[in-house]
């Protein structure tokens, strides 16, 4: 065991830069674990500024001045940021309506299942009792989850902290990015060629994943919302957001979000023609996302494995709750990119 550890450290930690990187990673993990809740506005601001910096750099590379690029980037951010808070009251209203309708949805689905079982002469007292026991907790579970979700959105919308601090931090992180980069360089060792190479690889993978996944979520949510709205689907906004968020967890997310989609469809139409059109349209959206949109926006080199995503969501969501769920994928992508880019001593031998 000791020989294995010795060989491992000799292969992966053979330079001062490696120990410096390990030190900063360790300090970052400790700070995030103990101060993650307090630093949530800062972490969210850094994430937003990091994504927007790609747009700002793109505009600068096209020959635009720094001031013009910064102004255009902040304008895009302002539109997106304000649209969220204008949109939240409509979402909150739909959540409250859905909470009030959950008992009726439960009764409707339960009656539907009983009728289906009766048609196939499978029903019995024991089977009915088993179904009741299996589904009795669902209304309470969904009501509590939606009420907490609604309360969380309302808290975010009314919190002066996020209304002021996040835009404030994003502005200065973009405006004075070179200053903050200079601060970071002070903490690094004088010899940092290897660290610079690692960061370039990490930056390429991390930004590619965040940009691609963010665009995928927005496109899927907008298309789903539009299709469901044209079909007059109840709670179309909630379903569109859930379908958009489901792309964060490949395969598993699509399976989980299908449950509320089917339940609401059954509650609204039963086994009517409209229900089948609704389900087919939803399946087409999922198929286009998995086979066209995701491969187009995300290359394989920046695509996280579903198992890693689930583990990250469970760990960081368990530690920080809502903000942990929000930051789980970026953190997991960042750590994965470091592991891929970290050179081994054997790899340098030609």
Image (cartoon, grey):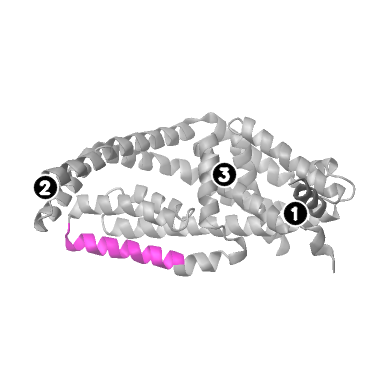
Q: What x and y, as percent, mark residue 330?
A: 59, 49
State the SS at label 3.
helix
- Image position of 188 (left or right of 301): right
Residue annotated with mark 2: 124
The crowding category of the residue bearing disc 1, from other C-alpha atoms within 10 Å (few below 14, some 14 to 19, many at least 20), is: some
- Image position of 130 (left or right of 253): left
Quarter location, residue 300: bottom right
Q: Are marks 1 and 3 in contact (CB under 8 Å)?
A: no
Residue annotated with mark 1: 199
Does the magenta portion include 243? no
The crowding category of the residue bearing disc 2, from other C-alpha atoms within 10 Å (few below 14, some 14 to 19, many at least 20), is: few
State the SS at label 1.
helix
Which residue appears at 20% of the width and 41% of the height?
A: 132
Choose between 260 and 312: the one closer to the eye.
312
Q: What x and y, as percent, mark residue 211?
A: 58, 57
The crowding category of the residue bearing disc 3, from other C-alpha atoms within 10 Å (few below 14, some 14 to 19, many at least 20), is: some
Q: Magenta stretch: give its range.
A: 271-290
Which residue appears at 66% of the width and 42% of the height?
A: 171
Q: CA distance from mark 1 to mark 3?
A: 19 Å
Choose between 159 and 132: the one closer to the eye.
132
Q: What x and y, as percent, mark residue 204?
A: 68, 59
State the SS at label 2.
loop
Q: What secondary structure is the stretch in magenta mostly built from?
A: helix
Q: Is residue 56 visible?
A: no
User: Which quarter of the rendering shows the C terminus?
Assistant: bottom right
| In the image, residue 42 above or below residue 338 | above
Q: CA distance from mark 1 to mark 2?
A: 63 Å
Which residue appears at 86% of the width and 47% of the height?
A: 16
| In the image, residue 175 above or below residue 321 | below
Residue annotated with mark 3: 327
């Amino acid at each position: 065991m000791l020989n294995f550890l010795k060989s491992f450290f000799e292969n992966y930690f053979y330079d001062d830069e490696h120990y410096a990187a390990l030190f900063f990673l360790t300090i970052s993990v400790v700070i995030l674990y103990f101060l993650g809740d307090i630093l949530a506005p800062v972490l969210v601001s850094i994430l937003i500024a990091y994504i927007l910096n790609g747009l700002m750099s793109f505009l600068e590379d096209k020959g635009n001045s720094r001031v013009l690029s910064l102004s255009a980037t902040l304008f895009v951010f302002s539109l997106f940021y304000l649209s969220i808070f204008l949109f939240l009251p409509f979402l909150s209203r739909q959540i409250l309506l859905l909470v009030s309708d959950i008992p009726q949805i439960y009764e409707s689905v339960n009656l539907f299942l009983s009728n289906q079982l009766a048609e196939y002469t499978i029903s019995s007292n024991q089977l009915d009792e088993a179904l009741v026991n299996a589904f009795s907790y669902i209304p309470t579970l969904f009501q509590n989850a939606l009420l907490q979700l609604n309360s969380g959105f309302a808290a975010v919308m009314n919190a002066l902290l996020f209304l002021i601090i996040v835009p404030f931090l994003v502005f200065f992180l973009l405006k004075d990015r070179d200053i903050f980069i200079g601060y970071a360089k002070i903490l690094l060792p004088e010899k940092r060629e290897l660290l610079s190479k690692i960061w370039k690889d990490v930056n390429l993978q991390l930004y590619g994943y965040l940009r691609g996944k963010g665009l995928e979520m927005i496109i899927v949510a907008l298309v789903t919302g539009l299709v469901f709205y044209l079909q007059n689907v109840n709670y179309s906004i909630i379903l569109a957001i859930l379908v958009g968020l489901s792309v964060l967890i490949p395969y598993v997310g699509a399976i989980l979000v299908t449950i509320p989609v089917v339940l609401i469809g059954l509650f609204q139409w039963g086994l009517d023609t409209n229900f089948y059109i609704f389900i087919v349209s939803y399946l087409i959206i999922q198929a286009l996302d998995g086979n066209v949109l995701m491969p187009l926006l995300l290359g394989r080199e920046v695509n996280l494995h579903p198992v890693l995503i689930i583990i990250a969501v469970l760990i960081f969501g368990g530690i920080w709750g809502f903000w942990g769920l929000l930051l789980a994928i970026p953190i997991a992508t960042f750590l994965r990119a470091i592991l891929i880019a970290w050179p081994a001593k054997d790899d340098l031998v030609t």
